[in-house]
Image (spheres, rainbow, N blue to C red):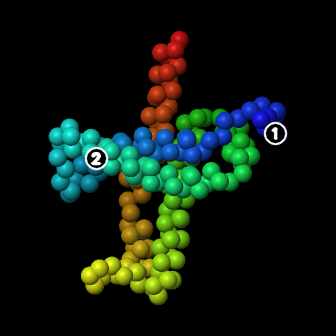
Amino acid sequence: MPSPIQGEEVEANPFYHGTLTNILGGAVWGYLQPYLYPAIPASPQPFHMLIRMLIGMGAGVLFSIGILALSLLPSWIFEVFERSVESRFLKDFLYSVCSIVTTTLILTALILSLLLLYGGRIPLPPANYITLHDYLYSLFNTEWSKLSLIPITGASLKFIGRQMKLVLTR
């Protein structure tokens, strides 16, 4: 279907671009865990590295909940975005960042609703609980710079893959 802006078709699939970027970036993030968190012991054996990469890919999929929610917005928004941003790398990076931010906001809304439901303290067995202060403390102490490796490396790997495809098809 032609777009109402210039009469040409635009591929606007934020879920595909954001999820693939998060999965690729999550694999790299999982692989780099021993270097990012040296205090946590991690085996350098290939099987354990593969498991860490799969766990990182799972984290990328979980962070894609946000882009799934954003893809429910009207498609013309993404068509305008696709036309206004030239670089595919930048598009992939922004989709991934929006996905992570939106997922964090969704989780925050869920935590707040649970806190309201349980009167300010979410019970955990056997005698512990989580408060709003605990949740906000964990958000503020998250090492967002290390988590930012997911969109950066994911978009970079997609860019390298596209360039390799161009070279191989010529």
Q: Position of residue 154 (x, y in %)?
A: 45, 40
Q: Is residue 149 visible?
A: no
Splitting the image into 4 quarters, where does residue 144 fall? bottom left
Mark sitting earlier along the chain (2/1): 1
127 and 32: which one is in front? 127
* Circle 1 residue: 5
Q: Residue at x 21, y 40 (%)?
A: 47
Tell whether 145 sits left or right of 47: right
Tell whether 49 sits left or right of 144: left
Splitting the image into 4 quarters, where does residue 91 fall? top right
Q: Residue at x 49, y 21 (%)?
A: 165
Circle 2 crowding by C-alpha within 10 Å: few under 14, some 14–19, many from 20: many
45 and 136: which one is in front? 45
Q: Position of residue 48 (x, y in %)?
A: 21, 44
CA separation, marks 2 and 1? 44 Å
- Secondary structure type for disc 2: helix
Residue contact at pointers 2 and 1, CB within 8 angstroms: no
**Residue type at tag 1:** Ile
Query: Is residue 44 placed above or below 72 in the rendered structure?
Result: above
Q: Position of residue 7 (x, y in %)?
A: 82, 33
Question: Looking at the rendered structure, which numbered label has been put on residue 151?
Answer: none
Query: Is residue 112 placed above or below 7 in the rendered structure?
Result: below
Q: Residue at x 27, y 41 (%)?
A: 50
Instruction: Give the residue at the far top of this rendering.
Output: 170
Circle 1 crowding by C-alpha within 10 Å: few under 14, some 14–19, many from 20: few
Question: Looking at the rendered structure, which numbered label has been put on residue 52?
Answer: 2
- Secondary structure type for disc 1: loop
Q: Residue at x 36, y 82 (%)?
A: 123
**Residue type at tag 2:** Arg
Q: Quadrant of the N terminus?
A: top right
Q: Is residue 95 visible?
A: yes
